[in-house]
């Protein structure tokens, strides 16, 4: 996703748009002020703060564009949202799914990952365990 172009931005890639930085930038664009994190924006959206709701809606639309782009090339049956995005799937999935229906005929199932923000850590641990297992059994 880091290299998927996203024109019209200071940092012209999709990751800048759908990252925590992108969520905060959208929230500020719609009127939120003060120190903000993506988690703060999602919490404010759950509390029905209008600027946060709009930022989350835009984030869901952006994610739908990325999913549609990936689906056009890869045609996956399933897309799993991880990290902070997956943790906020309760807010993002309705918008993402609604927007995805308007973007083309390919509509993979989109779900939140069970590992949330620990997905990368758990993947690293699994990779290390696989490597250790291979090394241990190759030496026997």
Image: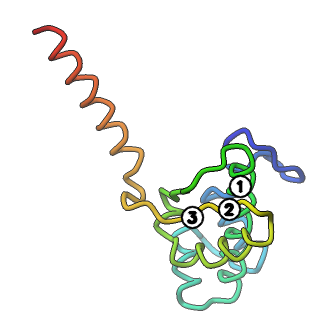
Q: Quadrant of the C terminus?
A: top left
Contact? badges 1 and 2 (CB < 8 Å): yes
Question: Which residue is pictured at 66% across the width and 71% down the height?
Answer: 96
Question: Which residue is pictured at 59% across the width and 83% down the height?
Answer: 45
Q: Which residue is disc 3 drawn over?
A: 109
Q: Is residue 52 left or right of residue 86?
A: right
Q: Quadrant of residue 135?
A: top left
Q: Is residue 72 left or right of residue 89?
A: right
Q: Identify the mark at residue 63; answer none if there is no mark.
A: 2
Contact? badges 2 and 3 (CB < 8 Å): no
Q: Residue furthest right?
A: 8
Contact? badges 3 and 1 (CB < 8 Å): no
Q: Earlier in the sequence, mark 3 or mark 1?
A: 1
Question: Which residue is pictured at 24% across the width and 31% down the height?
Answer: 129
In this picture the colour scheme is rainbow
Q: Residues within 10 Å of mark 3 (few under 14, many from 20)?
A: few
The foreground one among 48 and 98 is 98
Q: Identify the mark at residue 66; answer none if there is no mark.
A: 1
The spot of residue 86 in percent (x, y) is 49, 63
Front tag of 2 and 3: 3
Q: Residues within 10 Å of mark 1 (few under 14, many from 20)?
A: many
Q: Secondary structure at mark 2?
A: helix
Q: CA distance from mark 2 to mark 3?
A: 13 Å
Q: CA distance from mark 1 to mark 2?
A: 5 Å
The foreground one among 90 and 11 is 90
The foreground one among 119 and 98 is 98
Q: Secondary structure at mark 1?
A: helix
Q: Quadrant of residue 116?
A: bottom left
Q: Is residue 31 left or right of residue 48?
A: right
């Amino acid at each position: 996703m880091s290299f998927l172009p996203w024109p019209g931005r200071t940092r012209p890639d999709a990751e800048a748009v759908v990252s925590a930085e992108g969520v905060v930038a959208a929230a500020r664009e719609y009127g939120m002020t003060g120190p903000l994190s993506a988690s703060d924006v999602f919490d404010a959206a759950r509390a029905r703060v209008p600027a946060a709701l709009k930022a989350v809606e835009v984030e869901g639309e952006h994610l739908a564009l990325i999913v549609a782009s990936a689906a056009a090339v890869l045609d996956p049956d399933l897309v799993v949202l991880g990290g902070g995005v997956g943790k906020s799937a309760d807010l993002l999935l309705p918008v993402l799914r609604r927007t995805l229906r308007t973007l083309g005929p390919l509509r993979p199932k989109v779900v939140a990952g069970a590992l949330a923000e620990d997905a990368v850590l758990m993947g690293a641990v699994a990779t290390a365990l696989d490597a250790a297992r291979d090394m241990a059994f190759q030496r026997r």
